[in-house]
Image (cartoon, grey):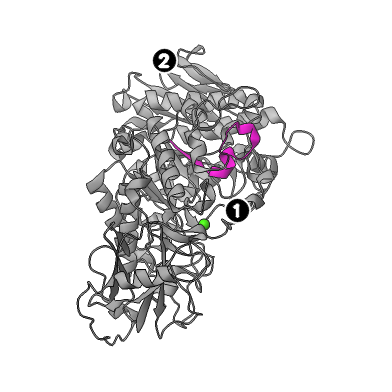
Amino acid sequence: MKKLLMLMAATAALIGCEVSKPHYESVNDYPVKSGSAQEMTYTPQQTQFSLWSPNADSVRLSIYDNGENGEPVCTQWLKRQKDGSWQGAIKGDLKGKFYTFCVFDPNMQYEREETSGIFATAVGVNGHRGAIIDMRATDPEGWSDDRRPAMDKVADAIIYELHHRDFSIDPSSGVTNRGKFIALTEHGTVSPEGLATGIDHLVELGVTHVQILPSYDYGSIDETRLADNRYNWGYDPVNYNVPEGGYSTDPYDPSSRIREFKQMIQALHSAGIRVILDVVYNHTYDVAHANFTQTVPGYFYRTREDGSLGNASGCGNETASERPMMRKFMLESIRWWVEEYHIDGFRFDLMAIHDIPTMNAIREMLDQIDPTILLYGEGWAAETPQLEESLRPIKANCPKMPGIGAFSDELRDALRGPFYDDHVGAFLAGLPGNEQSIRFGIVGAIEHPQVDMSKVNYSQQPWTLQPTQLISYVSCHDDMMLTDRLRASVKPLKGKQIADDELMRLDMLAQTVVLTSQGLPFLWNGEEIMRDKKGVHNSYCSPDSINAIDWNLKTKNKPLCDYYAGLIALRKAHPAFRLGDAELVREHLEFIDVTTDNVTGDAKVTPDCVLGFRLKNHAGGDEWEEIVVLFNANRQAVNADLPTDASYTAVVMDGEVNPAGLGTFTGKARIPAQSALILHN
Ligand code: CA
């Protein structure tokens, strides 16, 4: 009680005169907050608060000693400003305290609750209260020297998606801080049989970027009960601008998650790896308790004509990026992650829920900071968004969004089979009819004279301006692991499932397509050691027994892991594989017909489930004059005619990669069953 009185005595009215409440016909009339969207500014002398809530009748600030429970040590009524914000300041050093706002708004349709606001940058346990800390005190040693690893152009990116818990929670990871941000700072970790795990494994693999699954504060894991070992992907945002407490060593200490997240970035940067954040601005964990609702009811979500909430996310709500304050919020949030945390790229979950002007504004802002910061997302939504189609950042609208990419389900499903049925296969299952969709993925969805759009699975026209707008992949955290999918969809020669050696060959073939695409290749963690999820399609809250990577698999499937690393090194060494420019791709990438011995006459006929292309005339300044890439998804070897009479050297053949050469071919080459062959002359 004594403390309460002292703090109140220190309270000073530093803000200008209060204005009276204007009348708003609708939320569209709300003014936009001037200055920063952040709500708390700390100095040792005083802490200032500023919450945007135009229609509120009053806003109360409460200061607490702890991040949860207990009564406030001080409260203050904030004063209304012209820009719709409410301001106040408390004198004295509040470092270590916590705060909430309570908004009294006549539009509140849900039970009123205290909120940390929409832009807390530090929070207490479970993110219920904002925390007053000195951000500079969270910087790890050497943070001011932290730099993005060098990268000449966007086309150089090779992305590896990982989940913090999948990657290191199993004891076989050999990691000390298992499942935590700082797991990725531990060098020298090995599997029980002595093979590199953790960050060293990433370096060994050679990827240039990691895309980390949601790492902002999310709601599905109770941070006060981490010993329960619950699992979630984290697509349920609570505080967008604070790292998740469940991945920190102490979620009660607001600085812990921030410092450790920075340590992770610093370690990855030092290892030459850039970091992409998976951002989920399209919906919130729920609506009733969400900071958006408790701060400005009715503003941040789209509604249908009948007043019910839109649900393009499939999670019960969709946000309204086209509204000025939501757009400002997203822009400042992205800037915050780039400037405070040195993030190098963003993957937008269900990007198609947002609007094109907002996405372009984000790209423009990032270009001013560093044009090599990646920006891409899912060019689809779970349900139809409450926004006209011409404004939606769907794949087909990518030409209106230069520098923004999207995942290619055309390529993914042409390889593994459709989303709607895990038991239906495609190219990898030896089924014909997918060749044009694979060509579409190889050229990066650009206009190309040799791609027959009438035969491409989902798109009727090219949807990129540049090939780097296409994310090339066969699997990600969604859906089955590739291993499970192949087991479910490829008819076995005998027995119930295809044999392990066949599985490995198909896995290699799939990722050779991905890693020779002119799009940006994308790999999901654990595919390289043939991890499975016991056939689970949607493992978003499955236990560790399904999701954790068993690092013992690395020994068993070492040839696969070596193959991935070899292909990555080949791509990095040869600019022909990453031309980065649509004109160059049209000029240098030519699909070739492959004649089998069974065909007679002059006409060249490519058999089903065989695909070939060449990268000619030192494409992209490549030291190799010509590169020939051949895929064969059949269970028999195929003899292919080579495009010229020259002698070709194989550098990828039958599951092996060796730039020094694995044999030579003249006139014809033999593509072994279910494999890729890469040659050069
Ligand atoms: Ca949380």
Which sits in the foreground, 307 or 542?
542
* Image quadrant in which you'd find residue 371: top left
* Residue 519 visible to the viewer: no
**Residues packed near mark 1 inside 10 Å, few (<14), some (14 to 19) or many (20 plus):** some
Mark 1 and mark 2: span between their CA atoms? 53 Å
Which sits in the foreground, 596 or 118?
118
Q: Residue furthest right?
A: 495
Q: How many badges with numbers are in the image?
A: 2
First in sequence: mark 1 or mark 2? 1
Which sits in the foreground, 29 or 337?
337
Identify the mark at residue 407; answer none if there is no mark: none
**Residue type for callout 1:** Tyr
Label 2: which residue? 645
Judged left or right of residue 78, residue 661 is right
**Residues packed near mark 2 inside 10 Å, few (<14), some (14 to 19) or many (20 plus):** few
Identify the mark at residue 540; answer none if there is no mark: 1
* Residue 527 visible to the viewer: yes
How far across and down, in percent of the image, does residue 245 sit?
50, 52
Assess whether residue 521 is covered by the magenta stretch.
no
Assess whether residue 169 is covered by the magenta stretch.
yes
Segment colored magenta: 158-178
